[in-house]
Image: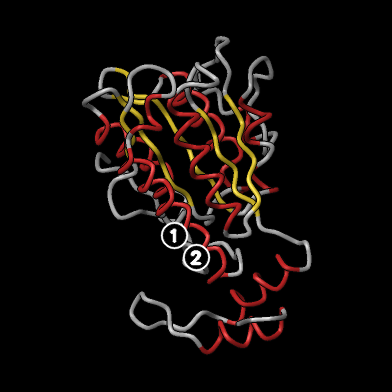
Amino acid sequence: MIKGPMERREFLEKTALAAGGILLSAAGADALTQQENGKKMKVLLINGSPRPKGNTSVALAEVAAQLEKNGIDTETVWIGNKPVRGCIACGKCHSKPGACTFHDDVCNSISGKFAEVDALIVGSPVYYGQPNGALLAILQRAFYSNGKAIAGKPAAAVAVCRRGGATASFETLNMPFQMLNMPVVTSQYWNIVYGMTPGQAALDTEGMQTMRSLANNMAWLLQATGGKPAPGRGDDPAAPMNFIR
């Protein structure tokens, strides 16, 4: 039995993890010690459904509960059901980094949380084989205007559907993460939950298990890295080019 923080840290440093027998780093052990001292890492979950208590909320709540069991704090934000702006490619956010030029919807309030958290999980219902359009508009603007605040931090997507289109939506949600050097966290299956009427997703036992596995993997990655973002390009500068010259 592990009795105290230091004993637990020593145990974790010496215990092999399942993935290739890699040992948990000292940074990961330090992260767990910080959690025990009241300094927890935090995951931001975005509910991209217009329904605050729909099946997307059920799926994300399962993830959040399992993260909390792993000692990770969570905050879930709902995008709401009011109109949101799409990006108009004005480029004004470059002159004022960290905020979209439009302040009349939830975009900036959501992206303003990026710097405070250690990881991101985005959930969306499936509409015509795609994520909710309002959510995509928010994410595109948030990532473009304040992507540096979330770059390199672990991320995951969750798609919720009645029957079909979930894999296409899931892939779409994951695309921006890969452009921002964000390690994509997986489960034992694609992060998909099924349900039609509000609350029905809770009956998808495999989907709920998938959400818990996702949370366990997210907690493991945060603990193993101590919450340190991925380095991305590092000292290798970007070299953008166009195919037509």
Q: Is 14 placed left or right of 109 in the picture? A: left
- Quarter of the view holding residue 36: bottom right
Q: Which percent across, then down, holds residue 190?
A: 29, 46
Amino acid at circle 1: Asn
Identify the element where label 2 is drawn. Answer: helix
Give the numbered dot on residue 27: none
**Quick one: 220 or 117, which is closer to the camera?**
220
The picture quadrant where one finds residue 226 is bottom right
Residue 42's place in the image compared with 205, above or below, is: below
Q: Residue at x 60, y 82 (%)?
A: 1
Q: Position of residue 178 (x, y in %)?
A: 39, 50
Furthest residue toward top: 83
Q: Is residue 35 above or below residue 83?
A: below
Q: Is residue 50 left or right of residue 1?
A: left
233 and 239: which is toward the camera:
233
Which residue type carries mark 2?
A: Trp
Crowd tier of the residue under label 2, counting other residues whose Cα lies within 10 Å: few below 14, some 14–19, many 20 or above: some
Q: Give the residue drawn at x 66%, y 28%.
A: 108
Q: Position of residue 20 (x, y in %)?
A: 33, 80
167 with respect to 193 (left or right): left
Residue at the (73%, 69%) spot, across then down: 34
Say which of 46 and 219 sits in front: 219
Q: Which residue is mark 1?
A: 217
Disc 2 designates what residue? Answer: 220
Q: Residue furthest right?
A: 37
Q: Secondary structure at mark 1?
A: helix
Disc 2 + disc 1, Cβ < 8 Å: yes
